[in-house]
Image (cartoon, helix red, strand yellow):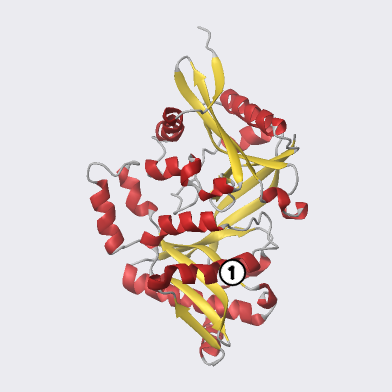
Amino acid sequence: MSTTLTIRPVTTKKDRKTFVDLPFRLYRDDPHWVPPLKGEALGLITPEKNGWFSHAKAQLFLADEDGCVVGRISAHIDTLALTMPAVQGFGPGVGQWGLMDAEREDIFQALLARAEEWLRAEGMTRALGPISMSIWEEPGLLIEGHDHAPTIMMGHHKPEYRGWIEAAGYAPIKQLMTYELDITQEFPPLVKRIIKSGENNPRIVVREVSKKKFEEEAAIILAILNDAWSDNWGFVPLTPPEIKDVGVKLKPIVFNDLIRIAELDGRPVAFMITLPDLNEAIAPLNGSLLPFGWAKLLLWLRKPKARTMRVPLMGVVKELQSSRMAGQLAFMMIEYIKRASVEKYGASRGEIGWILDDNQGMRSIAETIDSRINKVYQVYGKDL
């Protein structure tokens, strides 16, 4: 019996819900996939609820086959990314696609072709993907590490997607890595000496943030971040609407002793953000807070216990990045947060990343504390 495949744009609230629901069916037999909270997933693709849309636009597509939804993809353009230097990955004419899932390769290829068609119509000459949807959210395709669940704010994909993307003419352009380590173990003697030296330096203060001054602390971290990351591949500055939205989403899992700011001569010069792995708490909820999921999650948030702590962001101002002090400040922040993670939150495992494959400074820090690569994500590019 012949079948008919149709690729159609998402235009209604019902379509958006269908878009969010599809992975729950496609990944239901994958023991390592973590079902996102559906409300959060809907917020990501709803312009009124995602500050990223203040400087970006997107079109979502669904694939229908004989009355059943069998695939999805997003195509999007970040106007700030268009202004970035081309040597940093984005730049004029570069659009993106992401949030892709499909039952079969032919469906995947049809969706990808439709996304490329939309990007061309919008004047784009090159496509990068997968980026879902901001570079600050879930960039890259998982190509190594399918055998364990992702931590908070990291993606998980079917292994076959790699071959499907490459068959469409896309070439790898950048790898993003996460490192894991046993945080119950002491650091090597060299690292301990470096930390002790920093503690004896009266110019250095490493302090906890104050959640009571959330906006003020966030502004300090944002200033360091936008300076520290400005030369990195894929960098797009975070905007006030995005910061506001991120603050609302992450404030419940922000804890003073898990976020540190390093000051040199009284000036903030480095930061490290660590989050308890919320995925451990939401995995059993199957995407819904009803009927009792909200109570379970609220109880966890009041006194979180997590096996894994994730470090999604760390930064040192550019003027110090080539100095020994950059590593010293990083080791000090990691050590202090490691102690709190084990003693207060019962954690035994840390995950650092993502880290760009060419960020030798951060990779060296990760390797010096005896961590190892546990997941690799890949971003692809293609001229349209």
Q: In the image shown, does 249 or 206 lie closer to the viewer? A: 249
Residue drawn at x 49%, y 51% as measured from the top left: 154
The answer to which image quadrant residue 123 occupies is: top right
Q: Can residue 307 be seen in this view?
A: no
Residue depicted at 64% across the width and 52% down the height: 175
- Horizontal and vertical percent position of residue 61: 55, 29
Q: What residue type is labelled 1?
A: Ala
Please say if 368 is above or below 231.
below
Asked whether residue 176 appears in the rendered view, the answer is yes
Q: Nearer the viewer, residue 280 or 238?
A: 238
Graded by Cα atoms within 10 Å as few (under 14), some (14 to 19) or many (20 or more), the crowding at tag 1 reads some
Of helix, strand and loop, which one carries label 1? Answer: helix
Q: In this view, does 159 lie to the left or right of 344?
A: right
The x, y position of residue 343, in whole percent, is: 33, 74
Along the line of sight, the residue nearer the viewer: 175 or 98: 98
x 55%, y 17%: residue: 5
Is residue 212 placed above or below 107 in the rendered structure? below
Q: Name the residue under label 1.
A: 223
Find residue 195 and report its horizontal and vertical position in percent: 53, 84
Where does residue 78 sit, x and y in percent of width and height?
A: 64, 46
Pick the quarter of the image with the C terminus. top right
Q: Which residue lies at the image location 48% right of the left edge and 71% below the top edge?
A: 216
Instruction: Give the left or right position of residue 62, taking residue 167 as reference.
Output: left
**Figure disc tally:** 1
